[in-house]
Image (cartoon, rainbow, N blue to C red):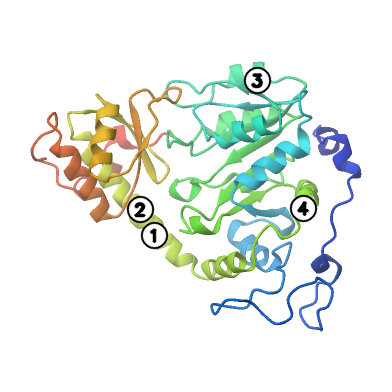
Amino acid sequence: MFNLQSLLRPHILSLTPYSSARDEYTGKVGVFLDANENPLGSTTDTGEYNRYPDPHQWAIKQKLAPIKGVREGQIFLGNGSDEPIDLLVRATCIPGKDNILIMPPTYGMYEVSAAVNDVEIIKVPLTTDFQVDVESVLGAITDNTKLIWLCSPNNPSGNLLQADAIRTILNAATHSLVIVDEAYIDFASTSSWTNELDTYPNLVVLQTFSKAWGLAALRLGMCFASEELIQILNKIKPPYNISAPTQSLALDALAHEEAKTNMVTEILAERQNLAENLRSLPSVQVVYLSDANFLLVKFDDAKGVFEHLIEQQVIVRDRSKVKLCDGCLRISVGTRTENERLMEVLRQMKDAPVSSDLPLGSGDEATRPELVSNA
């Protein structure tokens, strides 16, 4: 039986959180002389920002909850997903005693946050097809394993992790929080694990406004969990962690969900086209299946390709030193023009054909079995 209180660091339970002025008075109307703000306004001509924002972002949560199919009390909003990642470590892991479990290759901030907080990191690599080695994961969990991180769709490989594997871990790890990071879930043809929050009290789901919503500059992450855990995160977060401009722009974005959906559709079409074209290059060994907005691509000479692209001001991510990603570059799906420029530069290399029989935009990924994700 999962018991959150037994998982938390003891002093967190008795911690008295900071009470901000906007916690003590939540009204919108009045003469505000309680927060030592500047009553004369702001030194900017782009808006009035002299008043502190809602510390709990209730307006966003009211609009977000029905979109995600969760309750408002199951939502925590952070300064990017990195804030809830760090808060989860600090809430649960005693430095020098407890540990987290990660499955490389995966998002690097899980390890960084643990290291900053002096928390041991247990690593159980994914299999060669970038899936969970369930038996090894279950065997690596100790009495001091507080957090188990699963990135799905995974970064940098791009694939969804098998649902049965995640479910097995959720059922077995009843003394740990199991976090499923779904930063790229909008690009995948599967439902979110947020649908399982009431089934698994040890489940935490992370999402972000940075990818599909196109709001990376705002740094706004979403964390979904039990109301009990969300209350703990609210207890230990900085009082005003989400700025007023960020909250305002996020509300505007949520009012344009159709625009987000249309952008996702376009990115998925470009992902398919780009994958087809990359596979036509003799210098490309593998274009891995992707459920995200990027492709992991293995080249004969990844370093040479990377350097050539940089020289031509086409910027991709070199992942060749990451576990299981030897010889791989991670390529974000761009616009049609950007993708065409990428292919033009790649075809200029001496080991690539002068031209391709497969022009950008041709082919149907859905009809080719080897291109269809099995997630």
- Asked whether residue 202 is in view, the answer is no
Q: Residue at x 81, y 38 (%)?
A: 4
> The disc labelled 3 sits on which kind of residue?
Leu
- In this rendering, the label closer to the viewer, 4 or 2: 4
Q: Identify the mark nearer the N-term, 3 or 1.
A: 3
Q: Identify the mark nearer the N-term, 3 or 4.
A: 3
Say which mark, if any, is on residue 234: 4
> Closer to the camera, 194 or 35?
35
User: In the image as oriented, which residue stretches furthest toward the left?
Assistant: 354
Say which mark, if any, is on residue 141: none
Badge 1 local density, few (<14 within 10 Å), some, or many (20+)?
A: some
Secondary structure category for the residue under label 3: helix
Which residue is identified by label 2?
267
Question: What is the CA distance from the residue labelled 3 to the residue labelled 1?
Answer: 39 Å
Quarter in which the N terminus is drawn: top right
- Picture quadrant where residue 260 is located: bottom left
Secondary structure category for the residue under label 1: helix
Secondary structure category for the residue under label 2: helix
Which residue is identified by label 1?
263
Which residue is identified by label 3?
138
The answer to whether mark 1 and mark 2 are in CB contact below 8 A is yes
- In this rendering, the label closer to the viewer, 3 or 4: 4
Q: Identify the mark nearer the N-term, 4 or 1.
A: 4
Question: What is the CA distance from the residue labelled 4 to the residue labelled 2?
Answer: 35 Å
